[in-house]
Amino acid sequence: MRNDGPVVLFTGGLAGDGVARNTVHLANALARRGTRVEVICLKGGALAGELQGPIVTPLGQGRRPRGLALAAAVPALHARLQALSPSVVMSMGNHAHLAVWAALRGLPDIPRLYRISNDPRRSTRGASLRDLGLRLVAADATRLVCVSQAIAGQGAFRRARRDRRVEVLPNGVDAAKVQALARRGGPRCGQAPYIVAVGRAHPQKNYGALIDALALARRQMPDLQLRIVGAAPSRARGALVAQAQGLGIGSAVIFHGETANPFPWVAAAAAYVLPSLWEGASNSLLEALALGVPLVASRTAGNAAEVLDGGRYGALADPRDPADLARAIVRQALPETRILPGDRAAAFRLEAVTARLCGIVAGARSEHDEIQMLPEGPGHVRGLDDGLRGTNMEP
């Protein structure tokens, strides 16, 4: 790795989402190892205060829709990268990759890492453009860091796998920190049992199906409530409230809004539910795992099936089938049938994940130089799946 320039991490912002948290974790881990780090983002956020050493450079583009803001930020990002001459640039989330790719045009000597943080196959809408973007990023990458085996196996990454430029590295969790935060000010939620979902009200999170499942689950557990902890724009919240009222369970669905510390709500729940249609690697699932609560996760929620080891540490359900989701919820909410996660969180220790990621960053300079010297043609092509071997984090 070059010795002069800092490591640059780029993300849209430093609010409380998973990409921002992973950015802060990596930035701090690199700084503890004596690496100069600069976090560049469209705007700051609450998590900026958790950075211990790294510099934050907001580009001042956070007031417009994110896609437009990222496009508008490309010239400023390019100028900043040109001035810094960083040793490595890492794009931390899917939303940022094309902006980083564009900003790096004309700067071929800078190693570039792209962290594939979410499942790009989430829908057929815009699939062709999305696939084109993935292929551009994959061709440009010194290294692709994918949060699950399924994402690493994307067709768009076939050449990168052949060139052994793919790493599979799930998110990590600081179990002790999550447990400590859960003990701060327990929620006032009465005596009724409840399931909890954490995350913004967005079609990806599939809260409509979860409300349908709650109505079915209440046939066996009439007092069961649903508490949603996360941002809920008025239109999305209004639709979900109307749905619950139409099912006769309006008072059983409670919105708590976005909070920096959702963990007391999770720790006191009868079960945590991740009903998402798609994910990359859910931080909130790992955090619930660390709290030892019964877990229900969608089979299509990124690497949830890997985290729960196919159902060994929690229940898996079809997110498009409210009846299947309801059965899993009832099973996990009842003490006599629930499956507890035990010490499964130890397999996703944040310290181990960040150490491995720091190693990937540190090796990016030599990887980049190697790729620049690779001969054209089939002589350097290895087995299609070779790039996935040995890439899982060792617990």
Image (spheres, rainbow, N blue to C red):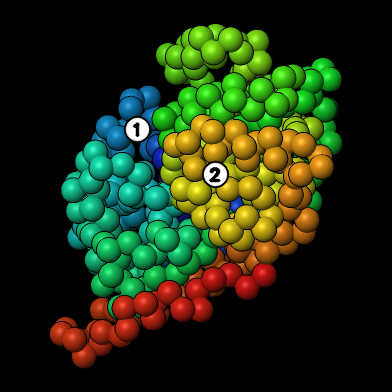
Judge by depth and name the residue closer to the eye, 92 or 336: 336
Q: Which residue is mark 2?
A: 317
Residue 97: give x, y in percent of width and height.
33, 51
Kindly indicate the quadrant of the structure image that contains residue 226: top right
Tag 1: Cα neighbours inside 10 Å, few (<14), some, or many (≥20)?
some
Farthest residue in the bottom direction? 379
The answer to whether residue 123 of the structure is visible from this angle is yes
Q: Quadrant of residue 368?
A: bottom left
- Please identify the quadrant where the N terminus is shown: bottom left
Q: Residue at x 34, y 32 (%)?
A: 66
- Cα separation, mark 1 vs mark 2, equals 32 Å
Residue at position x 44%, y 44% in the image: 278
Q: Looking at numbered disc 2 in the image, what kind of residue is underneath it?
A: Ala
In the rendered view, tell whether residue 374 sits above or below residue 11.
Answer: below
Q: Nearer the viewer, residue 54 or 256?
A: 256
- x, y percent for residue 261: 70, 33
Residue 54: x and y, percent?
56, 52
Name the one closer to the observer, 31 or 68: 68
Callout 2: helix, strand or loop? strand
Q: Secondary structure at mark 1?
A: helix
Q: Amino acid at mark 1?
A: Arg
Quadrant including the C terminus: bottom right
Residue in the image at 41% along x and 30% along y: 203
Question: Is residue 111 in view from this perspective?
Answer: no
| Residue that carries the numbered disc 1 in the rendered image | 66
Along the line of sight, the residue nearer the viewer: 291 or 212: 212
Image coords of residue 312 (percent x, y): 67, 58
Q: Residue at x 30, y 85 (%)?
A: 382
**How busy is the neighbourhood of tag 2: few (under 14 within 10 Å), some, or many (20 plus)?**
many
Ranked by sequence position, the earlier of labels 1 and 2 is 1
Residue at the left extreme, as displayed: 377
